[in-house]
Image (tube, rainbow, N blue to C red):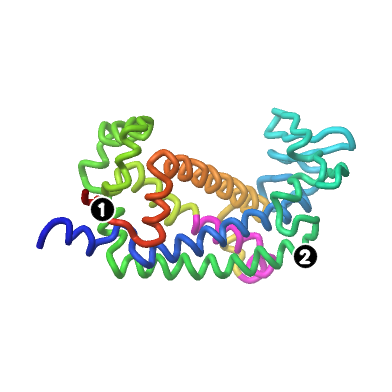
Amino acid sequence: MPRDVLMQNHPRHRLTTRLWHAVNALCLLILLMSGLTIFNAHPRLYWGEYGANDDYAWMAVGSSSTMGYLRIGETRIETTGVLGNWQDSEGRTRTWAFPGWATIPSSYSLADGRRWHFFFAWIFSLGLMLFMIRSLWNRHVQTNLHMRKREWKPSHIWRSFRDHTRISVIRQSWSEDYNVIQKLTYIGVIFILLPLMICTGLAMSPAMDANWPLLTDLFGGRQSARSVHFITASLLVLFFVIHMVMVLLSGPIRQIRGIIFGGTRKEQS
């Protein structure tokens, strides 16, 4: 069979991958924005089982009537106008940690934020489970994400990382198989960060803490689980930013068309 026909019969992105990509993107956006609403109720992070205003927080977003700041450890950064102290669309000064444009709902409501968060958390968890099962069944993991022996070599990983800093190489990557950096990143996100988000979310649940305290103990307490949950969310945001930069550099129209319709390993001229 001609090579170009084989390419057409083997899309770069399988249907299950494209569907999960769309559902996952929507869920993660809503989970992030509703999660920031929940964080606004107590914008401080601790390690251990307990944490309150009088306890030392390793990270905190603070505010006053005139300024806002972010403190990480002993380092304090003024964030007036961005975090802690900002103005809404009507010009009124607000002192929530995160501004209304970044939260769901845009006005502070812990109850509504929890409803949005928990509802889409179940959709996200179910989608991730089905995607993992289907990816093993249709051999997406074995075919596209499997790390070959030569790819574990430090020299190979370094060369792939260096290629990611060259725009000319990035522009050609749309038609190639996943390189080692892409494989490691996708494996880390799909099989480590996303499950970790689910597990730490469950560990913060009072019902889970009462009935299955082992999960909470695994993270060193509910406050530690909350900290890990926040750090993991931050890493996912970082992944999204880098992912979008790569899409823009490698050809956004082609990449968007590929993730919607499947694309091919290599377009034929």
The residue type indicated by label 1 comes to Arg
Q: Point out the stretch of residues depicted in magenta.
A: 194-211
Quarter of the figure with the N terminus: bottom left
**23 falls in the magenta region:** no
Residue 130 rendering spot, x and y as whole percentages: 43, 70
Q: Secondary structure at mark 2?
A: helix
Residue placed under numbered mark 2 in the picture:
111
Q: In front here: 161 or 100? A: 100
Q: In which quarter of the view is residue 55 placed?
A: top right
Q: Is residue 189 above or below residue 124?
A: above
Q: Is residue 148 left or right of residue 83?
A: left
Q: Are marks 2 and 1 in contact (CB under 8 Å)?
A: no
Q: In front here: 50 or 130? A: 130
Q: In which quarter of the view is residue 84 placed?
A: top right
Q: Write the residue at 30% across / 40% down.
A: 172
Q: Is residue 263 left or right of residue 89?
A: left
Q: Secondary structure at mark 1?
A: loop
Q: Is residue 127 left or right of residue 149?
A: right
Q: Residue 261: in sight, yes or no?
A: yes
Residue placed under numbered mark 1 in the picture:
265
Residue 38 rendering spot, x and y as whole percentages: 72, 56
Q: Is residue 190 above or below residue 66?
A: below
Residue 189 rendering spot, x and y as whole percentages: 45, 51
Label 2 to label 1: alpha-carbon separation: 47 Å
Q: Residue furthest front?
A: 269
For marks 2 and 1 on the same chain, the one whose residue lies earlier in the sequence: 2
Q: Residue 217: in sight, yes or no?
A: no
The residue type indicated by label 2 comes to Ala
Q: Is residue 204 above or below residue 155?
A: below
Q: Write the residue at 37% across / 62% down.
A: 261
Q: Write the residue at 75% across / 29% down.
A: 78
